[in-house]
Image: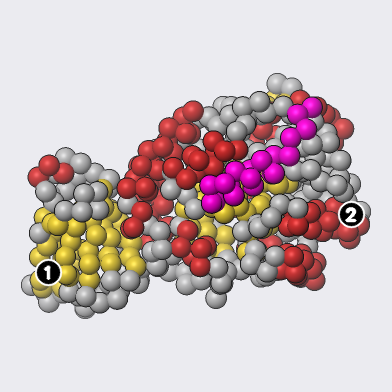
Amino acid sequence: MKDTKQQWFKDAKFGLFIHWGLYSILAGEYRGTKTDKIAEWIMNYLDIPVEEYEKLAEEFDPTQFDAEFIVRKAKEWGMKYIVFTSKHHEGFAMYHSKCSPYNVVDATPCKRDILKELKDACDKYDMKLGLYYSQAQDWHDPDGYVAKKDNSQKDYRAYLDRKCLPQLREILTEYGEIALIWFDTPLGTTKEESQEMYDLVKSLQPNCIVSGRIGNGLGEYMTTADNFIPRLPFEGDWEAPSTINETWGYNKDDHNWKSPEELIQLLIKINSRGGNYLLNIGPDGKGHVPDECMEVLDKVGAYVRENEEAIFGTKRLPYYPYDVLWGDLTCKEHYLYAHVFRKVRRIEILNINNKVKRAYLIRTGEELPVTVGKSCEGDGFIDIKVPERLEDEAYYCVALELEEEMPIFESIKE
Ligand code: JFZ
């Protein structure tokens, strides 16, 4: 079973992913050609030569990037950790690397150590910071792997020794405590090589979590694909990294934002199955986060903040073979939480056999009338009367204090 052994990660439930790099300048278009695929892959998809692509660094001057603003926003949205792209597949370091001049201080006019700015802001606001690091793919180093290309002539060992391992050492020694390393796309990395990376991380920061995508089964939690939610309960620690539109890196033409309602429902569904939701933003080349994206997150954040007790620290729900039509459920010791996503007059939970001490609306703390009974087929149910003034509302949460430690669900018997 995957186990991070880090209580903060198990409790966190909601985090902010930030994809930001030179690709953000291109915003999904290079010399008149657009990519409708994920924008941070533009160099690869449009076969932009290294000598051309690296010139982008000369344009990197993110006058609108404000690390403190982003961290304050993440707090306001109720997120408990941030994961930032210290180096994505493009190979460009978003911090002051001493082993590769292709970095945000030495290769740009702005000369700003973005990672340092972000880490200082995280420390100031007591936010965990994890770092995405593309360990295997590096489209800038001649010996880094490139997906969908022939890698047979590469001296991967030389790349590991020259760039990957020294850079990992840098990000884990020069920036204080790093909560996790988000490895990605291991490609041809062997088990021994993955182990070497794992050991390096742990030797420098034993509490730093290693993500599932280090490869070769060495990760400490499972990472699912974009918005992919396991249908059956997954017992170990896991995280669903997800986009709000259809790209991680900024694409000026992608306005396909999920609605706040969809995102709230996804968050609660992931939480009810025991996972963390790592939701991504892609600032543009100037460091500005698209306004539409911020508006969506402000609304999600309002629900998350209001209902913190029904989100943070919740545990995976025992297997419950039904969908509740009015919303979704989360739980933690002695509490079951009913997240209501559509207008209803009563909240019914069927096939449950708990004794209920009381029900209350989290928003105000007021107690709500609750009935516990048996259906005519003998199954236990809980029925909560919604106050009249809420009958035309949705997106609120009712807490049930239980006598027992956990919800006791039952299937309908044959
Ligand atoms: C990877 C990256 O290639 C991508 O650019 C982005 O950073 C994303 C978060 O991670 O993309 C993946 C990698 C693996 C899967 C899906 C997307 N997967 O295993 O399904």
Decide whether residue 114 is among the magenta residues: yes
- Work out whether residue 252 can be spotted: yes
How crowded is the residue under tag 2: few (<14 C-alpha within 10 Å), some, or many (20+)?
Answer: some
Residue 244 appears at what percent x and percent y?
49, 40
Which residue: 19% across, 66% down?
Answer: 350
Residue assigned mark 1: 372
Where residue 410 sits, quadrant-wise, is: bottom left
How crowded is the residue under tag 1: few (<14 C-alpha within 10 Å), some, or many (20+)?
Answer: some
Which residue: 55% across, 68% down?
Answer: 6
- When the figure is inspected, residue 395 is found, relative to residue 7, above or below; the finding is above
Residue 283 appears at what percent x and percent y?
60, 34
**Image quarter (top left, top right, bottom left or bottom right) of the C terminus:** bottom left
Q: Report whether the residue tagged 1 is closer than 8 Å to ligand 1.
A: no
Magenta residues (range): 109-127
The answer to which of 31 and 276 lies nearer the viewer is 276
The answer to which of 216 and 412 lies nearer the viewer is 216
Which residue: 69% across, 39% down?
Answer: 114
Q: What's the residue type where badge 2 is placed?
A: Arg
Where residue 52 sits, quadrant-wise, is: top right
- Work out whether residue 38 can be spotted: no
Which residue occupies the extreme top position in the image?
32
- When the figure is inspected, residue 202 is found, relative to residue 386, above or below; the finding is below
Residue assigned mark 2: 162
Q: What's the residue type where badge 1 is placed?
A: Val
Task: Check if mark 2's residue and mark 1's residue have beta carbons within 8 Å.
Answer: no
Q: What is the distance, in whole Å, between disc 2 and disc 1 at their CAs?
A: 65 Å
Which residue: 43% across, 48% down?
Answer: 78
